Image (cartoon, rainbow, N blue to C red):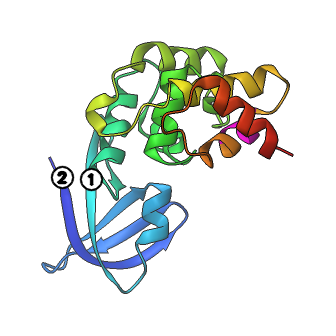
Amino acid sequence: MISLINGQVVSNKDGQVVVKTTGGVGYLVFASLSGLKEWVVGKEAEVLTYLSVRENALDLFGFTTEAERGLFKKLLDVSGIGPKSALHILSLGSVEDISAAINRGDVGYLTQVSGIGKKTAERIAVELKNKLADLGVVDDGGPVGDAVAGLVSLGYSATDARVVVKGLNPSGKSSEALLKEALQKIK
């Protein structure tokens, strides 16, 4: 299993990076969105990887953090989710945002990925709900999730609701207080 690659980035395009190690071997890695932004051609990089073994291919998938790779692995445990779909799900946002959406059962958020329909998104939410705590992310299912759900029920888009609520300080506030504050800020 190839778990980590250190080397110089020699190519970064079309969702893939090539990392050349000091031994002269170049590894083609399907990169997460954060990796594509972080790994600059000509610079040294450390790439956490996951090796996908299929009958006719060995594919490497690269990540910038252990939490990102952990979420990727959890997504692979869901029936119907392959490595490319899992990587596309990671492009939705931060590990924290994606984990929170899964814990809330936010199907609309997950269906933004091409190839992920309502049934698959529901399966992700059901199978992974409350199983992401070991990734070290904060669960915003409580008052924050309730505030987002409240805005959505009032007719605001899920994306707008998440953006507004994410900008609030939830410390010590009830769902109602967060919702009231969010309504004052939303346009």
Q: Residue 147: within the magenta?
A: no
The residue sitting at the bottom extreme is 42
Q: Secondary structure at mark 1?
A: strand
Badge 2: how crowded within 10 Å, few (<14), some, or many (20+)? few
Q: Amino acid at mark 1?
A: Thr
Front position in the image: 71 or 154: 154
Q: Is the stretch drawn in magenta largely helix, strand or loop?
A: helix
Residue drawn at x 29%, y 40% as measured from the top left: 136
Q: Indicate the position of residue 119 as horizontal and vertical percent values.
A: 61, 14
Q: Residue 160: within the magenta?
A: yes
Front position in the image: 54 or 45: 45
Q: Indicate the position of residue 109 as horizontal and vertical percent values.
A: 64, 32
Residue drawn at x 60%, y 44% as measured from the top left: 166
User: Residue 49, which numbered label?
Assistant: 1
How many dots with numbers?
Answer: 2
Q: Amino acid at mark 2?
A: Ser
Q: Secondary structure at mark 2?
A: loop
In terms of image quadrants, where is residue 31?
A: bottom left
In terms of image quadrants, where is residue 7?
A: bottom left
| Residue 113 sits above or below residue 105 on the image | below
Cα separation between marks 1 and 2 = 5 Å
* Residue occupied by mark 2: 3
> What residue span does the magenta drawing correspond to?
158-162
Residue 85 visible in the picture: no
Residues under numbered marks 1 and 2 in contact, where contact means CB atoms less than 8 Å apart: yes
Residue drawn at x 80%, y 41% as measured from the top left: 184
| Residue 9 sits above or below residue 163 on the image | below
